[in-house]
Image: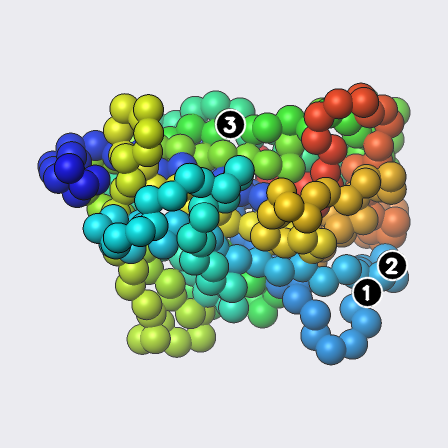
């Protein structure tokens, strides 16, 4: 019995792994959050952040299992690689919106999004104009909305501090964040319609229909996606390992290109340099420690 037969008019789950540099913008009711990825691609010349430091290029992409396009494809039902599909489809973002075809939410988004919050350590900042407009500034690589569902954050093993010279100036506190976040939601039906819409020409939109897969020992079928914006080993293949993190999260600076000081901000704070970034304060011997943190603005 294939996944489509098993799930006829039933339920399936959508599980999206979110990794790397991105900005989560909450709505007032917290029923929806918009994820905006800054464009950190290599532009052919050395790029610098707002504070003059070197900007390391990042790649933004969507990944899903080839079986989600057609669960009846023969020979693809092989053991999954650890952390990624054996047959993965990768689409690299280029100034577009990803519309997930989600129904309205029946309540607020549940769970915890444990990433740095600009409202805490830099409350004088706000999104740049038109960040959520139909055609946003060119700095936006990709934008998508997550409606309802639940967040689960995989916390890194290290503790981080973020300087507060753009807030109250108090000594920062050590916190644990997660560079890997999962958003999940259970839907009714037997497929998910995903639309890739270029900001510049919506007539060039591409529609993709994804079907859930019933994995071994799972109670209902699922569609597992990944949205990422990363530098070294951008596909995060376990065969290539992880880089040692011994410096501040310099890549966090990419997010400041999506923000600006609020009007009538105290002139003393209009100069954002140096921009606050997470700084390592302690680590443990076991577990994962990564950087490229996303952030939220609540």
Q: Is residue 37 visible?
A: yes
Say what secondary structure mark 3 lies in.
Answer: strand
Comparing 234 with 167, the one in front is: 234
- When the figure is inspected, residue 255 is found, relative to residue 238, above or below; the finding is below
Considering the image in quadrants, where does the N terminus appear? top left
Task: Look at discs 2 and 3 and give the one toward the viewer.
Answer: 3
Q: Which comes sooner in the sequence, label 2 or label 3? A: 2
Residue at point 64%, 46% (across, down): 239
Labels 1 & 2 near each other (Cβ < 8 A) = yes
Say what secondary structure mark 1 lies in.
Answer: loop
**Residue 246, image x, y percentages:** 87, 39
Residue assigned mark 3: 152
**Residue 177, image x, y percentages:** 68, 29
- When the figure is inspected, residue 295 is found, relative to residue 46, above or below; the finding is above
Residue at point 87%, 52% (across, down): 273
Residue at point 79%, 61% (across, down): 55
**Numbered mark located on residue 53 in the image:** 2
Labels 1 & 3 near each other (Cβ < 8 A) = no
Say what secondary structure mark 2 lies in.
Answer: loop
Q: Quadrant of residue 164?
A: top right
Comparing 219 with 293, the one in front is: 219
């Amino acid at each position: 019995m294939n996944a489509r037969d098993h799930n006829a008019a039933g339920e399936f789950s959508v599980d999206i792994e979110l990794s790397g540099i991105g900005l989560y913008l909450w709505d007032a009711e917290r029923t929806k959050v918009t994820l905006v990825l800054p464009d950190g691609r290599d532009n052919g010349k050395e790029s610098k952040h707002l504070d003059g430091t070197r900007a390391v290029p990042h790649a933004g992409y969507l990944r899903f299992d080839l079986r989600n396009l057609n669960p009846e494809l023969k020979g693809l039902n092989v053991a999954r690689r650890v952390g990624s599909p054996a047959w993965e489809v990768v689409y690299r973002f280029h100034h577009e919106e990803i519309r997930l075809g989600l129904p309205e939410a029946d309540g607020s988004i549940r769970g915890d999004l444990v990433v740095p919050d600009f409202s805490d350590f830099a409350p004088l900042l706000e999104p740049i104009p038109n960040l959520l407009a139909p055609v946003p500034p060119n700095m936006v690589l990709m934008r998508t909305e997550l409606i309802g569902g639940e967040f689960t954050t995989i916390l890194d093993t290290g503790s981080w501090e973020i300087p507060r010279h753009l807030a109250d100036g108090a000594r920062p506190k050590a916190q644990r964040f997660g560079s890997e976040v999962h958003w999940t939601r259970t839907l009714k039906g037997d497929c998910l319609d995903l639309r890739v819409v270029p900001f510049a020409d919506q007539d060039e939109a591409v529609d993709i229909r994804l079907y859930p897969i019933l994995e071994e020992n799972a109670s209902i079928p699922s569609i597992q996606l990944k949205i990422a914006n990363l530098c070294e080993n951008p596909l995060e293949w376990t065969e290539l390992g992880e880089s040692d993190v011994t410096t501040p999260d310099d890549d966090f600076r990419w997010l400041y290109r999506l923000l600006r000081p609020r009007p009538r901000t105290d002139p003393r704070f209009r100069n954002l340099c140096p921009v606050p970034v997470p700084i390592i304060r302690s680590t443990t011997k076991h577990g994962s420690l990564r950087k490229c943190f996303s952030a939220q603005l609540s």
